[in-house]
Amino acid sequence: MGEVCAEFAGTMILILFGVGVVAQVVTAPDGSLGDHDSIAWAWGLGVTLGVYVAARISGAHLNPAVTLAFAVFKGFEWRKVAPYVVAQTLGAFVAALIVRVGYADLLASVDPGHTIKTQFVFSTLPGNGSGPASIQTAFFDQVVGTAILVFLVFALTNAWNNPPMANLGPFIIGLVVVAIGMAWGANAGYAINPARDFGPRIASLITGYGGALRDQNGYLYFWLPIVAPLLGALVGGAAFKYLVDIHLEPDEDEAERDEAVGEPVPETAAERPAGPTT
């Protein structure tokens, strides 16, 4: 239960910043409250802060694609996959509802009909709702973006691979998301996370956005930011395993301290540091 609560809370923090910044930018069409770069940075910082919230308890996956990759390639327990995915999606859903209420007046002022014009505040669209990207291009984009994410998460959390020290891992992973947003944001809005897209999409659907399951061309689209990131996670995980991981050999000190960084850290009463004595 603690791990599920941590995944819920960490994902909620991530979405509060991510969806919140898009709402702020979209409801200020003159650009006075932000632009593409502020969106990329806020998403990255949201990831960083969400990971800091949940890492000690759950491993801070915050993303069903990451959870799947850890189960397939890193020995994460399969019995925990479904509870993690549900918690992540619920965390994203609740956070999106909070943003929806908080920005209700501004959204109504710029888009009274709650149309595709502001739908991408909550969920992704091909070409960000206006570009010429096809479904095929958007699918490929999401596979590539998520593969990059998982490949680098594995690299940054592998104890044998010179990972960031002094608890800097969450910050560096946040920078990875910033970089993906700046390099792979045009074709499909870099969801790279099924929970990040589906939870807010459902939140918008039940609060006035009747077309939330479709894209700007009327095609049923909600499935793409679910299926493509899951496939991308497998591609990225396999790439890291066979290009890098199988060639890593620990020295004696590394062998002693190695642990699965992406899994929750067990802590029993016996393992906790003793309290102060008098």
Image (cartoon, helix red, strand yellow):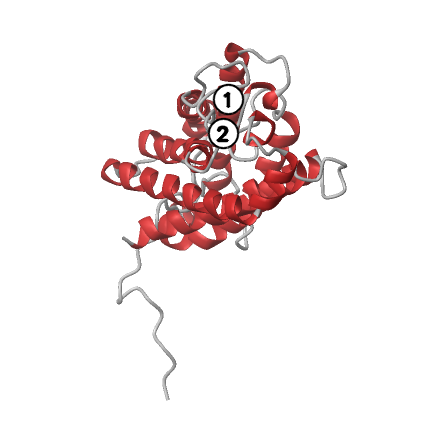
Q: Residue furthest left?
A: 79
Q: Position of residue 91 (x, y in %)?
A: 40, 45
Q: Position of residue 120 (x, y in %)?
A: 56, 30
Q: Position of residue 261 (x, y in %)?
A: 41, 45
Please give the name of the residue rendered at 49% of the width and 16% of the height, measured from the top-left corner: 139
- The disc label shown at residue 192, or none: 2
Q: Quadrant of the C terminus?
A: bottom left
Distance from disc 2 to disc 1, alpha carbons, whole Å, reads 6 Å
Q: Position of residue 158 (x, y in %)?
A: 45, 40
For the residue marked with disc 2, what is the amino acid?
Answer: Ile
Q: Is residue 78 left or right of residue 197?
A: left
Q: Nearer the viewer, residue 12 or 113?
A: 113
In the rendered view, would you say 152 is above or below 4? above
Q: Is residue 20 left or right of residue 92?
A: right
Please give the name of the residue rendered at 51% of the width and 12% of the height, measured from the top-left corner: 135
Q: Are marks 2 and 1 in contact (CB under 8 Å)?
A: yes
Please give the name of the residue rendered at 41% of the width and 23% of the height, measured from the top-left corner: 238
The residue under label 1 is 142
In the rendered view, would you say 141 is above or below 212? above
Residue 3: tell me if it is visible. yes
Label total for image: 2
Residue 256: tell me if it is visible. no
Q: Secondary structure at mark 1?
A: helix
Q: Residue furthest front?
A: 112
Q: Residue furthest bottom?
A: 278
Please give the name of the residue rendered at 46% of the width and 32% of the height, measured from the top-left corner: 197
